Image: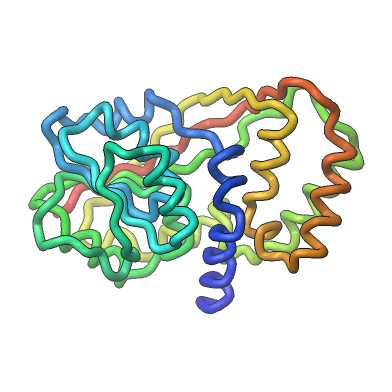
Amino acid sequence: MRRQMTEFARSFDRAAEEYERGRPGYAEAALDAVGLPADSVVLDLAAGTGKLTRQLVPRFARVIAVEPLDGMRAQLERVVPGAEALVGTAESIPLDDDCVDAVFVAEAFHWFGTSAALDEIARVLRPGGTLAVLFNERDGELDPPLTQAFRDTLDELSLKKPPEVTVSSGLWQAPFPGPFEPLEEERFPHTVERDREGLLASIASWSVVAGLPDDQRAVLLGRLAELIPEGRYVSSLRTDLYLTQLR
């Protein structure tokens, strides 16, 4: 199953442009709740195209972004030049011991939620350092709503993803607390507006879509495109923040 999870995670590199085009950022109130001073040194781990990184750069003195996938990291370097982008993984972070005040992981911890990753995060944190895990979750219906055929297609895609690689399964929390205090959870409303192309790009960036063979992916996205009229679409999301400190 770990190999299957890795293959799903690697599929994001095939959809880096769509990820950048369609994925939302995170509720600013969630970042406020982390409560770090402006002179902090922070790490955005598994930073992707820098969706969270760009929100951290104006907040903190130094922001390091670690991302293993070349395509995703190229987007990050283009869009967020104010961050230090490095190649690395959650199990092998290219930083010294005790060198950052906080580690942020946005929309990614479920891909590597192991004791080894948690220990590596603890290694680079300073004593008492903060770990903030964030996820965007749906918290209402799309406005305006789309057809039943569209919703049925999305439901079919969701069923194809093994529960082990979903956030909602909660399996990513298994290695906690480890060297950390118990997780504390807060939820923050997060409304996102996208046009037709942004909505389609978001779907194209899902691992279960990005991992399809090229021909199947093209057919699926073509079918979905026919079901999405031109317009602006408002997604009612929430940003879930899981916060803990190194013991």
Decide: is 149 above or below 1.
above
On the image, the x and y values in percent for residue 152 come to: 86, 46
User: Which quarter of the figure is the N terminus placed in?
Assistant: bottom right
Pick the residue in front: 103 or 130. 103
In the rendered image, the vertical position of residue 125 relative to residue 198, given as above or below: below
Q: Position of residue 26 (x, y in %)?
A: 45, 32
Count of marks overlaid on the render: 0
Q: Is residue 198 above or below residue 10?
A: above
Foreground residue among 200 and 173:
200
Q: Residue 140 location in percent, x, y?
A: 67, 28
Residue name at image x 17 percent, y 61 percent: 95
Q: Left or right: where does residue 98 sit relative to residue 198?
A: left
* Residue shown at the point (66%, 59%) measured from the top left: 210
Residue depicted at 47% across the width and 48% down the height: 107
Percent position of residue 239, x then y: 47, 34
Q: Is residue 19 left or right of residue 108?
A: right
Protein image colouring: rainbow
Q: Quadrant of residue 117?
A: bottom left
Residue 167 appears left or right of 217: left
> In the image, is 49 to the left or to the right of 138?
left
Q: Is residue 220 visible?
A: yes
Quadrant of the image for the C terminus? bottom left
- Specify whether residue 137 is in view: no
Q: Nearer the viewer, residue 34 or 53?
A: 53
The residue drawn where x is 69% and y is 49% is 204
